[in-house]
Each structure stands twice: as C-alpha cells, then as structure tokens.
Amino acid sequence: MKFGLSLYEVPCGFDQEPDRQKAWMPSTPPRAPYAERPSASRGRKVAEPESPTRTPFARDRDRIIHATAFRRLKEKTQVFVAHEGDHFRTRLTHSLEVAQVARSMATSLGLDPDLAETVALAHDLGHPPFGHAGEDELQLQMDAFGGFDHNVQTFRVVTKLERRYPRFDGLNLSWETLEGIIKHNGPVADRLDRPSWSAIAEFDRDYDLGLSTWASAEAQVAALADDIAYNTHDVDDGVAAGLFSLEDLLDVPLVGPHVAGALREFPDCDRSIIRLEAVRRMIGAMIEDVLAETRRRAAAAKPRSPEDVRNLGHALVALSRDTAEGLAQLRAFLMERMYRHWRVNRTRSQARRMLAEMFLLFLAEPDVLPEEWWRRAAERDQAGRARVVCDYIAGMTDRFAIEEHRRLFNLDVWN
C-alpha cells in the first residue's frame, strides 16, 4: 500500500463510478500474531463490567476524548502561544494528527488500531501551557519538591487528576493503555529512582506495568506517529510563520527532496500549496519507511505474541537507520531556525516569567488558589502544596494562564 495519498483521498467522480471503488479500497491486512487482542486484555485496576458495544481499547479512547484534560489541549501550544494565530498547531490538533497516523500504520501492520489511536490521543495530556517553555519552568520550580516530567504528569492525569467517576479517581484505563502511555518510548524502570517518577513507582507497586520491558507494538506505533507528525508539522508551521523559507529547506534531509520535487512539478503553484504538498509527501515517505523497517524487523525476530514484542530487547516499530539520521539533522535545523529563533525566545521568556510568578505566589499564599485547589493545598506540607500548585498550573491552557496572571498581578483586573 502506498501512503502518498490519504486513505480517504480519492479521484473526482469516485462516488459516481461504484465499479471502480474496489480498486481504491485498501484491503485490511490479516491480524499480526503479535498484535494486542482486546479479548485478552489484562483488565483494569478497578474491575468494571465490559461494555456491550465497545472493546476495552475503544472504551479507553472514548474516556480520553471526554476527559477535561483532553478538551484543554485545544489551547495548549507546542511552539507558538495560542494567541499568536489560529492556524498553528495546538496540542489538540497535534494529538488528532498523531492519532490519524497511528491508526493508519497500525491497520497496515495488522495491529489493533484502537489501542494505537488511544495511546496517541493520550500522549500529551500532561503538557503544561506554553509548550516546552512551560515544561522547563515547572521543572525548575519543582526541582526541590520532586520535579516535573510531562510523561509522568500524563499518567497522573489519567490515574488520579481526572475526577469523573464515583468509584475511582482517574479514568481507570485498561492495563495495555496505561502501559502504552508510560512506556511508548521504551522501558522506564531505570527512571524510577528519580523524584519526578515517584508517582509511577508508587502506582507500579500496586499494579505491575512491567516497566523494564518494551511496550506493545501498538504503543510503539503511537510513538513513531508522534515523531512523524511533530517534525513534519513544525516544518509546516515554521514556514507559515516566516521563520524560514522553502528555499532554506532544500538542503535539509527528509524534507528537502520533497520541496524540490513539488517546486519542479508545480512551478506556477501558490507557495502555500507547495509547502503543504511537500509536507504531505514527507509524511507519506516517513510512514512508508516505518512500515518497511518494522516488517523487516518482524521477519527477522519472528515475534509470535505481544509478550515476544515486549521482550525483544529493542524496538520492533522503528525508522530505518538512514531516515533516523535524516530526522536527527532535521531536528537540528528546527532547533536552530525555529525553537531558538529570537521571536520564539521572546515568547518563551515571557511565558516562563508568568508561570514562575504564579507558582511562587500560589506556594507562598495558597489561599489565593480557587477554593477546590486551596482545600487540597491546605492539607499538605510544603512539598505537597508545591505539587498541588504544579498540578493547577500544568492544567491551564495558554489563554487561561495569561488571564490568571493578569488577575493576580494587575490591579485593574478584579473578577
């Protein structure tokens, strides 16, 4: 199967020619022997009756979509702040794009698409406002109080901070989804002695997630889908924001050949369309690379079960060596030309100052927190109060953080 076109892009007049439809309908590959099977799920920490209409993984997906933390992703950003423009990616649009790529790749590899999609949708739930600037500042402020890690925060959101059900805190997701959320980038047992990972160590003592092994192939697909979406769409946003041009990309691996090809084929086309065409081709090429490399590794290792995947000792789902090296060079370009651009640095600086000022104020005067959060903070020692303050700030959207800072530090704002 070629991924140059989306699975849903078809020629004009397609619906008027039903006889041609079969030629365009992608066939579903047989289920891989190492795919996760919903019927064999290890269940949930708190036992619940099974859904009569959804698999456990589809049910997890729906719980994530309905979560408050998921809705807040609509105004949490990755590079740009939400008020800088409506066309840049937010954590929500990014998560949807990752989920689309993950589901397509999982289907092509004969894996469970619901589980891959679910892990993809959940992977950014713990990110604070203002992207990497927000995470850097919370790491600094929490250094003396147990630290901050966005992956751990995501896990805390789905196991503790979401409060929607009478019988348990969190979302009570299936074992496979929880494993995928915390291990999608590989084993994490070596991190458990870090203060910022204490919540994972505590949870694992009561509910073993096998933190020393790799996660399912579906979770690994979600991790690669994140890499594909993140880097290709930062290229798109960077050109759209004027931080670099299409010509600047011509010598950059992975994207340069696609820019050159689109310019050559469509010399008179609008530049914004050329940008989108190059990014689309880049996504397709990276997906094809992951599929080919994963099939090569599966043929060599011959895993026969999900446990075989976990115990391989290395990732099953991966980019080829050449593409991984090209991705590293692309990331270096983006770091220099986008993430450290002076315009982005100004935004980062302002965002960090706002979060630092709010954190220190809430820690010193917890009675200015909203009542629910003040009650949580009042019952704890200083480290516990710092964690409550961190949870409150990490849950903010960019826009809410800006407005909350104004309410706290501007005398002309009283509401």
Image (spheres, rainbow, N blue to C red):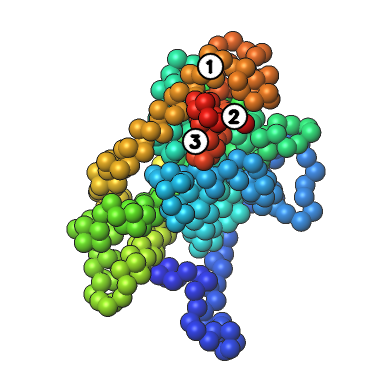
Q: Which quarter of the picture shows residue 44?
A: top right
Horizontal relation, residue 126 to residue 354: left or right: right
Residue type, numbered disc 3: Ile
- Secondary structure of the residue carrying tag 2 is loop
Q: Position of residue 3 (x, y in %)?
A: 43, 68
Disc 3 or 1, which lies upstream in sequence?
A: 1
Real-space CA distance between mark 1 and mark 2, rounded to the nearest whole angstrom: 21 Å
Q: Camera-side residue: 405 or 320?
A: 405
Q: Position of residue 117 (x, y in %)?
A: 56, 53
Residue type, numbered disc 1: Leu
Horizontal relation, residue 261 to residue 381: left or right: left
Residue 414 disc label:
2
Residue 402 disc label:
3
Which is in the foreground here, disc 3 or disc 1? 3
- The residue lying at 54 percent from left, 48 percent from top is 74
Real-space CA distance between mark 3 and mark 1, rounded to the nearest whole angstrom: 18 Å
Q: Are marks 2 and 3 in contact (CB under 8 Å)?
A: no
Q: Which residue is mark 1?
A: 363
Q: Residues within 10 Å of mark 3 (few under 14, many from 20)?
A: some
Residue farthest along the front direction in this orientation? 412
Q: Position of residue 65 (x, y in %)?
A: 64, 49
Can see residue 281?
no
Residue type, numbered disc 2: Trp
